[in-house]
Amino acid sequence: MFKKILVPSDGSTQAHKAAEVAADLAKSQDAQIVGIYVIDPFPFIGIGDASAVGLQAYMSEAQAAAGKSLSMIREMCEARGVAYVGDTIERSTAYEGILETAEAEGCDLIVMGSHGRKGIQALILGSVAQKVLTHAKVPVLIIKG
């Protein structure tokens, strides 16, 4: 039924749970996992030398977090004998990066975690999962934390 499953990650416990579910599902469907980690662009203000140093430190830390998160997904897939590819991209909004990747990679399912924010916090912060659900052209499976 599913052949290519996109698994967005932010390194959280919820993302880890979603990756486990996705890897098990991929095993049962003989599907491939596509892992994605979206990095927010550095808020560059262009003033002084500190900006270049700040950018380098920010990107270094963001790439390390992405590598750790995607390695976790890769290890889950390897343990189950599931094909895996992963990538890190930079976008100003995570949900757009997720949707662009799903389309570009030809994914037929997105499996992702939900932070489960409620009330005012959800209203103010928004939800990447909610935006993916609203705009995705393929089925989305949300794993609650």
Image (cartoon, grey):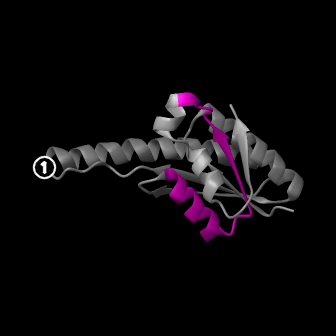
User: Is 69 situated left or right of 41 in this image?
Assistant: right
The spot of residue 31 in percent (x, y) is 80, 60
Give the camera-side residue of 38 and 121: 121
Asked whether residue 114 is in view, the answer is: yes
Residue 14 shown in magenta = no
Residue at 43% across, 56% down? 90
The spot of residue 51 in percent (x, y) is 19, 47
* 10 Å crowding of disc 1: few (<14), some (14-19), many (20+): few
Which quarter of the rendered picture does the C terminus lie within? top right
Count of labels in the image: 1
User: Is 47 situated left or right of 63 in this image?
Assistant: left
The spot of residue 86 in percent (x, y) is 60, 56
Asked whether residue 87 is in view, the answer is: no
Which quarter of the rendered picture does the N terminus lie within? bottom right
Residue at 77% across, 42% down? 21
Residue position marked by numbered label 1 in the rendering: 47
Residue at 58% across, 31% down? 117
Please report the bounds of the magenta region as a residue range. Answer: 94-119
Residue at 59% across, 30% down? 118
Q: Secondary structure at mark 1?
A: loop
Give the camera-side residue of 130 and 16: 130
Q: Quadrant of residue 92?
A: bottom left
User: Is 31 situated left or right of 6 in this image?
Assistant: right
Give the camera-side residue of 64 and 26: 26
